[in-house]
Amino acid sequence: KRPSRTTVFTATATALSLLGDQALYALLPLYFQEIGLLPIQVGILLSANRWVRLLTNHLAERLVDRFPVNLMFVLSLTLGALLSLAYAYISSFLVLFIARCLWGLCFSFIRHISVMGVASSTEPQNLGQMMGFYNGISRIGSVLGIVLGGILFDLIGFSTTLALFCLFSLFAVPFAMRSGLQTSSSINYQQQKNKSSTRYSALLCCGFCIGSVGPGLIMSTLGFILLSRYGTEVDLMGFVVGIATLNGLLLGCRWVLETLGAPIYGALIDRTGIRLGAPLCFLVGLIVMLLLNLSENLAGLALGMIVFFACGTALSTVLSAEASRLGAKVFVRYATANDLGMAFGPVIGWGAYELIGTPNFVFFLGAGLYAIGMFSTFAAFRQE
């Protein structure tokens, strides 16, 4: 089924809004010394937007019911774009911290309005596929922010790159104004109260597990795992490449899979049913992580990471679709649980390494969290 106009336009606006944020993840670790930041300050800046969303997600959900949706969408996109100028030309840690918190506020509105707009304009039986289209298109912004940001950084420098991304991000505003957004207040949480509260708790648990394992545990520690296993260089199909390049290629697979595969995964689970599809994805991801913990073969690790990222993309797509189908209040709680997992994931992974001394233990932790997620899906979808 073709994506609706609302899906395409809101996803494109989201993609453009992500350029400066994603470029910062790639460039700030390379440039922080030039602007006088400490390593710990880099970590704080790159995580501040996720922590603040634990509060601003709920603010966005409440204000969307009270004020014009299109106006809030345009304001959020505009402010989010202009914040890239702060990253470009300001070196004060305090000002940058405030800017990152404001970006977290903006993204809470951008995500909530976009996802609920897609849910409101889509028939329930096609929601997984439409959410896949939304995730796939919006993640093009992540790919371009990281890849194009790195290329432009080498050509024109840090400040000019982010200033240029500010200009590109402002093009999100025309897409937002023509997206045909509708309010989602007709999907009311109170109307869903007759369904077990266990369903909602289990759905939140799934969101936490997905966020903490993929974007949290694995993406924050994979580079160190590769370094500890294979050293600073590896032989890749006859070419000697640095471990940072290998890490970038593997992490880039996640965005490629999300861009190209999310609509397909969503459509498949729309047809097989979430009761079967969600536990199966958790199970396959669990098995892959246990195998990665046992085997250190490079080809096996690369294949395993691709399968794991595919499972994570499918889960993120269909569970966010399910949460949005149940209404704005359910979705905002699911999104907050997912953000909480992404914020805690790196802490869990690096804390485990500090205690145990082996980075491979991260895969065992991920398998355990996916096991919790799998059993949670049984509780969440047993009535489907």
Image: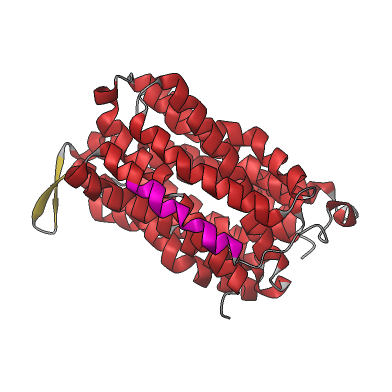
Task: Please state the horizontal and vertical placement of residue 268, each as a whole percent of the image.
Answer: 56, 73
Residue at the extreme bottom: 1
Name the residue at 66% across, 57% down: 70
Name the residue at 37% across, 48% down: 165
Magenta region: which residues?
164-177
Decide whether residue 378 is among the magenta residues: no
Task: Please state the horizontal and vertical placement of residue 66, each as a whole percent of the image.
Answer: 80, 47
Horizontally, is 135 left or right of 109 in the view?
left
Is there any visible trace of residue 156 in the rendered image? yes
Decide whether residue 175 is among the magenta residues: yes
Which of 105/230 is in front?
Answer: 105
What colouring does the structure picture have?
secondary structure
Is there any visible trace of residue 305 in the rendered image? no
Corner quadrant of residue 188: bottom right
Task: Please state the horizontal and vertical placement of residue 357, each as a whole percent of the image.
Answer: 35, 24
Image quarter of the C terminus = bottom right
